[in-house]
Amino acid sequence: MRYIDTHAHYNDEAYENILDETLNNCISKNVDYIVNVGYDVPSSKKAIELSDKYDYIYSAIGIHPHDVDNYKPEQILELYEKMNNDKIVAIGEIGLDYAFVKDNKQKQKKLFIDQIKLANYLKLPILIHSRDASFDTYDVLKNEEQAKYGTLFHCFQPSDDLVRLVIENGYYVAFGGNITFKRNESFKEYIKKIPIEQIVIETDCPYLAPVPYRGTVNTSANLPIICDKLAEYKEMNVEDVAKAVYENSLKFFNIKQK
Ligand SMILES: [Zn+2]
Ligand SMILES: [Zn+2]
């Protein structure tokens, strides 16, 4: 079985001194491609630099809702225009996060909408980060701005509304290490309902290491654990799940296989 990590942060300082050995280990564990995701201007710049350096790494650039006060979408456009954009495959991660800050909802929404517009302008899909904000995420996508070139919910937290929205619109969802957590057993009922054609896997590394590696620095080498759990919840053969999520990832990001 071969794997694609649709959401990783090798631009994080956790890998500063161990990047080459970590990536080599992932490659030896059948990881073929990695989409490295930015969350502000410096990390997006670094994501592009990594995709320039490693042929199997692609990049996504964008401003996370946590940084709503610190950066502007124009700076992301500037990176796209000034740097090598051949391997930039998405705008992300962008979205809404009310888990820590709730008093800036309007500002977060504006930043989210402006970056969806940027993605449409650049003809790129979007990677959505939505945490404790499912109603407003639903509202933006339904009533404010649609991404024309693809929508993927990373680290998907299923709810009745969002699952309906995903199924109705053919959006993609990515599941990561959190589906192995005991407290997320309720995901199973939702996962059963989402067509396999709309599902991919991710690590969100260095965060969210799956059971039994919780608390360690996560890497793309843990993708098989996530794939196993997904197959269990989907009640499908694991080889079929691995093949489906691999092909879905190539299609979503428009990656041409070598
Ligand atoms: Zn995220
Ligand atoms: Zn992330």
Image: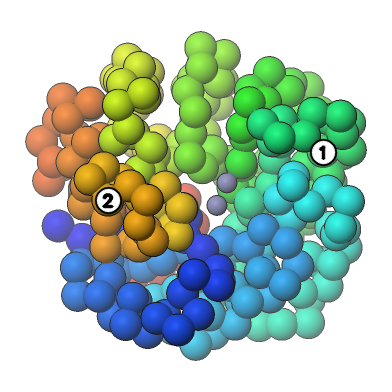
The disc placed on residue 108 is 1
Quick one: label 1 or label 2, which is nearer the N terminus? 1
Identify which amino acid the numbered label 1 is placed on.
Answer: Gln
Looking at the rendered image, the disc whose residue lies closer to the viewer, 1 or 2, is 2
Q: Which residue position holds label 2?
A: 213
Q: Are marks 1 and 2 in contact (CB under 8 Å)?
A: no
For the N terminus, which image quadrant?
bottom left
The residue shown at (23%, 26%) is: 233
In this figure, which colouring scheme has been used for the structure?
Answer: rainbow
Q: Secondary structure at mark 2?
A: loop
Q: Secondary structure at mark 1?
A: helix
Q: CA distance from mark 1 to mark 2?
A: 33 Å
The disc placed on residue 59 is none
Spot occupied by residue 124 in the image (x, y as percentages of width and height): 64, 56
Q: Is residue 21 above or below residue 145?
A: below
- Name which quarter of the figure residue 238 lies in: top left
Out of 190 and 147, give the one closest to the viewer. Answer: 190
